[in-house]
């Protein structure tokens, strides 16, 4: 299929991009890596009149330390999650997750900001921003603001992002010596959207969990933190009993949707298995 | 078992040698000439509006707005095309009693599956054509949908063809020996119900054609990505009333076919009509989303089968009921019943037993048509047979190798007739079994499996014996009235510079047909391979023939080339003998030189013979007319099919908590008779196995209760990918057929035939400690977890 005809504007600055969008209204879309938007255009699921190319805006690029955070520019490509040393050191969870996101050709173009903005509930990175307690910096016609990941994902493909707003960067707290992370996903083929996936970041006090944030994806309309399970783990050792209790709590934390291929009960089962395996790894030092 | 034809130490002995495909470099360099890339002057683009309903009456169609768009040249409905195209019916006479409704390029008043093309738009670009599609309004009135086997068979249920008595397309029965008696007296009876998911071919290049009707010449040229240009030449000629000689079908490079591009598709027929209506070239390339709802699907069977055995594990009888649901009509011209027919005829084929009964019922439903796709029927027959054998083995306490060794037709027992009536010339089951056992290091695998099981790791080992149908004679289609040739033709010429050009009717879809034909020609003439040029796939240039399908390219096409080349060689030597004043029998050709047959001393280059014959015929004795172009046709005689055989094995690991399966290694020992190019044979086997593994674990067209395809995109329809594929170890046994000089049989479908059966056996082997069984493919995590009662 071929896309409907559209106009194209390449923005050089954030303001240019916002202006162009404001003028075109609902009929405009920002385009970053295009790895989600272009298929949608070709399938005519979306048919905007104007595409605003944001890939030439320098302010959306780059990875750097800012205070206690790592600032990851919205245009950071999935493949840069693998090659960027600052990410490997200060956001190792993202570094570990990147190989699971699609395939090399898509990782070469797809952007971090695009993935967060799209908020596909089956995507890896949006869920990881929850586990990392990241903040998302947004620029819009009425200025800039930072939104915590916890408040960002609202419903299926619905986020705190208003029409015409742009993600500038994502701020991730720097990884610390007393922290451990774990990630895995269950997929029938490598690179596919997962049947269930999960990432977690824990702060340890000795062998006890001081704090933990566990985030699932492919389990519902949004990436989902499992606060019931987290509460069970905080303050305790990761022994088999605790892990089993945490697994049990998922029933309250998750409400997987019906699907023709993966019944809700199966997805819940897989989530439990995955949680058990990841907590086991975390306990062993991950 | 190798015959004297190949002595690899002779110069130019290419038969049996791994040489690269001459077209590989061209294709890798991006120089392929696919129909998808083709642009002709004044060419227009077609797009189709498709039915969102699985079954509905077309109440009205409004095309006014679509027609008004700038750049749109034609909006055509079923009625427009019905005026110039005659309908077709997908039945064959030898399938007694089969029925199917007449088909038209586009429907007149009723749609019968979701995705059926209803209206065509032709415009200056595909994008404009799609803009116009959005403006067409069709008013539908829903009709009851038949969306699965059970509802299709319900008495008094909804009908795919209102007015018909039921949804049955075809019924067939085989009954040999005394089946009831054998079951009554058997020491062991095993029984199981099996189900096989619908899947589809997913070629790299989708269906593509450019139809170019020239009203001035009354000539239709169709550039068509198909395996069978001659079949389409015939059909376009007949259904559009254009004399055959004025229809030219050109099938150049094709991005894969696997049987899928053998069939008549409604859009393709429509595109020819659109070009006739416009007098301009019209191009249509199915996009991936369209392919999923309009390419043929395959499989979709439910089989209930039981096997009777004596106390020691000897097979006594097999009794089978195969139900298969096709589309709303049978595919033209090869029908949708060949698959089921092959299922019931191939079940039990490797084994020696007498009593066999089978019932086949082919049923209509409101889905896209099914038809022949790589290894037609084989994977189903193989899975049913090999599961029953394994179930029996475990019940009786026999090892899977032992029960097979005991029951296969012995290598020295041929010729032999199968209980389903197939005549086997010579097969090598025993040799293959033995070889596989060694190749797998079977005992070590079993020991490792036992070890790992203690640690909670569940490995499975599976094997599956198979028989493949190749080199089909007219018994396949011709006897049923289809104008599908089982013969092939070749024209070989010595060029003025002493090279050889071979025009041949077998076609190339990436499997290396052109490579093996050049090997045979070079070998038989005595010429370096680089001096042979093979041309395929143009009805105006290459002689009429069956082309490449069902494993016939090497066996039939290869023999055609061999005999044609031998005739050319005789003619060359006759001229040489005149020039050299020798007897033709005292001469031979080596490396492009006429030599003394005994001493091999060079006498004269064949380029010199060509020069004299073409330019200085005055120097030849009067009355000499050099015949340096030879045409030759060859149709298989003797056995109606050349059966091949082999056995596959695999090792895998089941994650019993997630239901995910990791394939560890795959093995095959295969006997395709004379191997012409070992490298190409190995890659055919690997590719075929990968397709079979796709069927085993991943591929399925899933439908909703309302007949909507749920996973019609490559995001949701899972094809096998490299990361999930195991290493594939290959062994060969060669039992050439004596029906031809070449001795080659087919190999293209062997890999697909048994791979899924093998995996199914291995998964059940892995699950043995849990009292869980699976008898359905694809084996999804959901099925594994369900069997293990994990949710
Ligand atoms: C075959 C395939 C497999 C894939 N597999 C996976 C997978 O396994 N896991 C996974 O997570 N993803 C997967 N993806 C999606 C891929 O990761 C996308 O690249 C990503 O989701 C979107 O990033 P993008 O830069 O390409 O965004 P685009 O496609 O350019 O845009 C997507 C949407 O986000 C908006 N947008 C983009 N950037 C911004 C911004 N800075 N501010 C505001 N809005 C913005 C656009 O307007 C658009 O609506 C796959 C894609 C393909 C084609």
Image: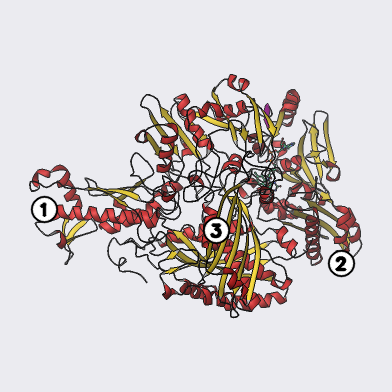
Q: Which residues are magenta?
A: A48-52
Q: Which disc, if any, is residue B664?
A: none
- Label 3 SS: strand
Residue denoted by label 1: B579
Image height of B647 relative to B330, above or below: below
Left or right side of B604 for A165? right
Residue A268 in the image: state x and y as whole percent.
81, 56
Marks 3 and 1 close (CB-CB < 8 Å) = no
The residue nearer to you, when weighing B220 against A258, is: B220
The answer to whether one can see residue B403 in this image is: yes
Q: Are marks 2 and 3 on the same chain?
A: no
- Label 1 SS: helix
Residue denoted by label 3: B173
Image mark 1: chain: B
The residue nearer to you, when weighing B601 against B149, is: B149
Image mark 2: chain: A
Between the residue at mark 2 and the residue at mark 3, the CA separation in whole angstroms equals 70 Å
Image height of B415 relative to B148, above or below: below
Q: Residues within 10 Å of mark 1 (few under 14, many from 20)?
A: some
Q: Identify the main secondary structure in magenta.
A: strand
Q: Are marks 3 and 1 on the same chain?
A: yes
Q: Is residue A51 highlighted in magenta?
A: yes
Residue B704 in the image: state x and y as whole percent.
70, 45
Q: Which quarter holds ligand 1?
A: top right
Left or right side of B710 for B443? left
The residue nearer to you, when weighing A14 against B354, is: B354
Q: Which disc, if any, is residue A207?
A: 2
Instruction: Point out the tag, 3 or 1, that comes first from the N-terminus.
Output: 3
Marks 2 and 3 close (CB-CB < 8 Å) = no
- Label 2 SS: loop
């Amino acid at each position: 299929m071929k896309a409907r005809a559209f106009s194209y504007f390449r923005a050089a600055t954030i303001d240019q991009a916002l202006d162009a969008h404001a003028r075109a209204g609902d009929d405009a879309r920002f385009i970053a890596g295009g790895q989600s938007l272009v298929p949608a255009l070709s399938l005519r699921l979306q048919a905007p009149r104007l595409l605003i190319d944001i890939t030439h805006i320098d302010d959306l690029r780059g990875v750097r330390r800012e205070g206690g955070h790592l600032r990851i520019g919205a245009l950071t490509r999935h493949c840069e999650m693998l090659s960027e040393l600052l990410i490997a050191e200060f956001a190792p969870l993202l570094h570990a997750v990147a190989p699971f996101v699609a395939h090399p050709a898509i990782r070469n173009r797809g952007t971090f900001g695009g993935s967060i903005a799209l908020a596909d509930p089956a995507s890896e990175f949006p869920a990881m921003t929850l586990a990392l307690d990241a903040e998302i910096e947004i620029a819009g016609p009425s200025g800039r603001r930072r939104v915590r990941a916890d408040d960002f994902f609202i419903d299926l493909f619905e986020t705190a992002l208003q029409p015409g707003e742009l993600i500038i960067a994502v701020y991730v707290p720097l990884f610390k010596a007393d922290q451990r992370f774990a990630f895995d996903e269950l997929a029938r083929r490598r690179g596919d959207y997962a049947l269930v996936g999960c990432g977690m970041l824990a702060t340890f006090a000795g062998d006890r969990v001081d704090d933990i944030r566990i985030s699932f994806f492919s389990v519902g309309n949004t990436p989902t933190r499992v606060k019931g399970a987290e509460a069970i783990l905080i303050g305790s050792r990761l022994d088999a009993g605790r892990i089993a209790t945490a697994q049990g709590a998922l029933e309250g934390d998750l409400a997987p949707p019906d699907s023709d291929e993966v019944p809700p009960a199966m997805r819940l089962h897989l989530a439990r298995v995955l949680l058990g395996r990841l907590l086991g790894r975390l306990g062993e030092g991950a | 078992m190798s015959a004297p034809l190949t002595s690899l130490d002779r110069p130019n002995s290419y038969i049996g040698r791994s040489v690269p495909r001459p077209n590989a470099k061209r294709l890798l360099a991006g120089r392929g000439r696919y129909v998808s890339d083709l642009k002709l002057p004044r060419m227009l683009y077609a797009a189709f509006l498709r039915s969102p309903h699985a079954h509905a009456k077309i109440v009205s169609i409004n095309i006014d707005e679509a027609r008004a768009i700038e750049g749109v040249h034609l909006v055509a409905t079923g009625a427009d095309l019905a005026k110039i195209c005659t309908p077709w019916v997908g039945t064959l006479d030898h399938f007694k009693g089969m029925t199917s409704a007449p088909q038209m390029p586009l429907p007149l008043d009723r749609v019968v599956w979701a995705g059926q093309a209803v209206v065509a738009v032709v415009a200056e670009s595909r994008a404009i054509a799609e803009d116009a599609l959005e403006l067409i309004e069709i008013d539908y009135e829903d009709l009851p949908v038949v969306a699965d086997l059970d509802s299709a068979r319900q008495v008094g249920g909804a009908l795919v063809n209102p007015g018909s008595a039921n949804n049955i397309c075809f019924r067939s029965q085989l009954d040999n020996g005394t089946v009831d008696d054998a079951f009554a007296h058997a020491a062991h009876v095993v029984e199981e119900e099996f189900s096989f998911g619908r899947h589809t071919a997913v070629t790299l290049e989708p269906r593509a054609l450019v139809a170019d009707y020239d009203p001035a010449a009354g000539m239709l040229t169709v550039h068509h990505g198909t395996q069978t240009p001659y079949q389409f030449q015939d059909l376009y000629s007949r259904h559009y009333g254009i004399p055959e000689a004025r229809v030219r079908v050109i099938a150049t490079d094709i991005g894969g076919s696997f049987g899928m591009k053998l069939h008549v598709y409604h859009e393709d027929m429509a595109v020819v009509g659109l070009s006739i209506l416009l007098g301009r070239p019209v191009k249509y390339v199915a996009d991936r989303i369209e392919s999923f709802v309009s390419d043929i699907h395959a499989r979709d069977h439910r089989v209930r089968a039981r096997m009777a055995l004596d106390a020691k594990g000897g097979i006594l009888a097999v009794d089978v009921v195969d139900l298969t649901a096709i589309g709303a009509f049978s595919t033209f011209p090869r029908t949708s019943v060949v698959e089921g027919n092959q299922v019931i005829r191939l079940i039990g084929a490797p084994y020696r037993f007498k009593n066999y009964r089978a019932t086949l019922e082919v049923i209509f439903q409101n889905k896209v048509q099914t038809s022949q796709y790589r290894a037609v029927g084989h994977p189903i027959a193989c899975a049913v047979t090999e599961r029953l054998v394994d179930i029996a083995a475990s019940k009786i306490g026999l090892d899977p190798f032992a029960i097979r060794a005991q029951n296969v037709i012995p290598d020295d027992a041929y010729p032999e007739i199968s209980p389903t009536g197939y005549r086997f010339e010579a097969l090598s089951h025993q040799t293959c079994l033995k070889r596989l056992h060694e190749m797998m290091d079977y005992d070590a695998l079993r020991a490792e499996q036992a070890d790992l099981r203690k640690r909670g790791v569940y490995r499975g080992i599976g094997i599956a014996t198979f028989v493949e149908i190749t080199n089909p004679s007219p018994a396949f289609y011709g006897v049923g009235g289809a104008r599908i040739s089982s013969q092939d033709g070749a024209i070989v010429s010595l060029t003025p510079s002493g090279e050889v050009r071979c025009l041949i009717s077998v076609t190339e879809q990436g499997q290396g047909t052109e490579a093996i034909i050049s090997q045979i020609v070079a070998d038989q003439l005595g010429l370096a391979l680089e001096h042979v040029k093979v041309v395929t796939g143009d009805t105006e240039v290459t002689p009429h023939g069956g082309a490449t399908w069902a494993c016939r390219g090497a066996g039939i096409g290869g023999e055609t080339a061999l005999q044609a080349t031998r005739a050319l060689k005789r003619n060359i030597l006759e001229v040489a003998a005149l020039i050299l004043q020798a007897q033709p029998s005292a001469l031979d050709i080596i490396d492009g030189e006429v030599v003394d047959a005994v001493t091999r001393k060079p006498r004269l280059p064949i380029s010199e013979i060509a020069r004299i014959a073409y330019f200085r015929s005055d120097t030849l004795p009067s009355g000499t007319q050099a015949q340096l172009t030879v045409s030759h046709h060859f149709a298989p005689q003797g056995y109606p099919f050349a059966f091949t055989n082999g056995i596959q094995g695999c090792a895998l690991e089941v994650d019993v908590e997630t239901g995910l399966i990791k394939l560890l290694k795959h093995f095959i020992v295969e006997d395709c008779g004379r191997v012409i190019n070992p490298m190409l044979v190995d890659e055919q086997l690997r590719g075929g196995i990968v397709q079979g593994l796709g069927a085993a674990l991943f591929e399925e067209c899933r439908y909703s209760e309302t007949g909507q395809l749920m996973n019609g995109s490559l995001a949701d329809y899972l094809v096998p990918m490299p990361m999930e594929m195991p290493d594939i170890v290959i062994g060969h046994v060669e039992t050439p057929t004596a029906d031809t000089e070449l001795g080659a049989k087919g190999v293209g479908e062997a890999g697909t035939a048994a791979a899924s059966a093998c995996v199914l056996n291995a998964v059940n082997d892995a699950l043995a400690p849990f009292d869980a069984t699976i008898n359905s493919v694809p084996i999804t995590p959901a099925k594994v977890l369900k069997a293990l009662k994990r949710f």
